[in-house]
Image (spheres, rainbow, N blue to C red):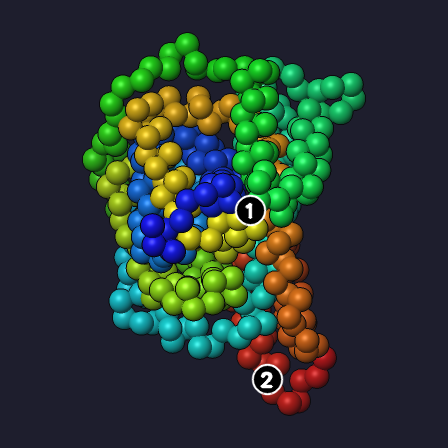
Amino acid sequence: MPTWLQLNRTEISGSLGDLGTLLPLGMGLIVINQLDPTGIFFTIGLYYIFSGLYFRVTSPVEPMKVISGYAIAASVTASQVQASCLLVFAILLLLGITGLIDVISRYISKAVVRGVQLSTGMLLLTMGVHLMTGDSTLQQLQGVTEPYLQLQQIGFLPVGILLGGGLGLICLLLLDNRRLPAAVVVIGLGMLIGLLAGSRQGWENTVVGLHLPELLPYSLPTAADFSFALIILVLPQIPMTVGNAVIANADLSKQYFGENASLVTHRRLCISMALANGFSFFLAGIPLCHGAGGLASRFRFGARTGGSNLFIGGLFLLFAVFFGEHTLNIVRLLPLSVLGVLLVFAGLHLGLTVIDTRRRKEFFVILLIAGITMASNLAAGFIIGAVIDRLLRWERFSI
């Protein structure tokens, strides 16, 4: 096999790294917004495979967090989510084909990139802790710490904290073990716990068959759907996508893979995400991107080549085609606290990218972006941080 397409234990381990973000948001969109599981898992599988072949290094696939998070919290309609996919497709395709994204990136300094990476790491770390403590949106909506386990508490401690703490310790011990890759062990133990103590919700109706996603199952979105999606979902998402999934992702890929990441450019990232969202619009998928947090997680758990993408993409496609909407029953075997463990380690690893920062002004910008992000959102942190960074270049400002 070519060097950029390897498949071994560490590649398989790393391929599981970004499930911590992907599965909870995907499950939320299915349960709360009534999106089609077949279309979601099918398009995710296709995008994983395409990304691995397109970039020739490991590449993350994640839901667009602003769109997905707001859609779940506000219970927006499936048609509005689909409208956001088409709008994102058009905007990112324009940025990529015209080269406008390269113009934007010239005005984004390393300090701003590190601020976005630190902020993303903090968001992943926070989300991971919430999944372990039972405070995530999905868990709150279902009213229990582990919605798909029969046991919710051991003594006075929630089962999610015990699982998260125990599996987190195992993950820490195996983090650099190539014979027993950490993510494989943690996910495997999580699935075993789900089999032994899971509620097995919906298993009585699970059947194996041949399932393919429908073409435009929610019909064409209306003009009102597009207007709502543009103002409420897409416009807040685009700055975050540019900062995190394009500029920060490309920077991180260069750090991790050097010359092997020559195909991971700003323009190709925009075009890749545009194509993914175009397919999601027609095949009932969800808005997808290449988040820097997912890349940090995949790298930390061992993924290096496109082979990791082909492995996990193939799994998603197999589940979608043979189980269809019942794929969700298989996903429910994995306790949410297990996904939280992956997110915690991904967040910590991504946050460590700031260690190459030396100047006080750079630290000022990084901390400013992180603070605004935690108080508001990453899009606001990115925009304000970029503006302040330009102002600090004047000699009259000193920190």
Tell which of 74 and 100 is nearer to you.
100
What amino acid is at disc 2? Arg
Q: Earlier in the sequence, mark 1 or mark 2?
A: 1
Quarter occupied by residue 134: top right
Q: Residues within 10 Å of mark 2 (few under 14, many from 20)?
A: few
Residue marked by disc 1 = 301
In the image: residue 242, left or right of residue 138: left
Quarter occupied by residue 205: top left
Measured from the top left, where is residue 267 in percent x and y?
A: 34, 66
Measured from the top left, where is residue 202 in percent x and y?
A: 44, 15
For the point 55% across and 29% down, the residue is: 188
For the point 59% across and 34% down, the residue is: 186
State how far apart marks 1 and 2 are (Cα). 38 Å
Q: Is residue 134 above or below residue 275?
A: above
Tell which of 165 and 23 is nearer to you.
165
Q: Nearer the viewer, mark 1 or mark 2?
A: 1
Helix, strand, or loop for circle 2? loop
- Residue 236 can be seen, yes or no: no
Measured from the top left, where is residue 328 in percent x and y?
A: 42, 25
Helix, strand, or loop for circle 1? loop
Q: Is residue 98 above or below residue 281?
A: below
What amino acid is at disc 1? Phe
Tell which of 258 and 93 is nearer to you.
258
For the point 38% across and 34% down, the residue is: 315
Q: Is residue 18 above or below residue 40?
A: below
Quadrant of the drawing holding the C terminus: bottom right
For the point 55% across and 46% down, the residue is: 301
Measured from the top left, where is residue 51 in percent x and y?
A: 35, 51
- Residue 393's label in the rendered image is 2
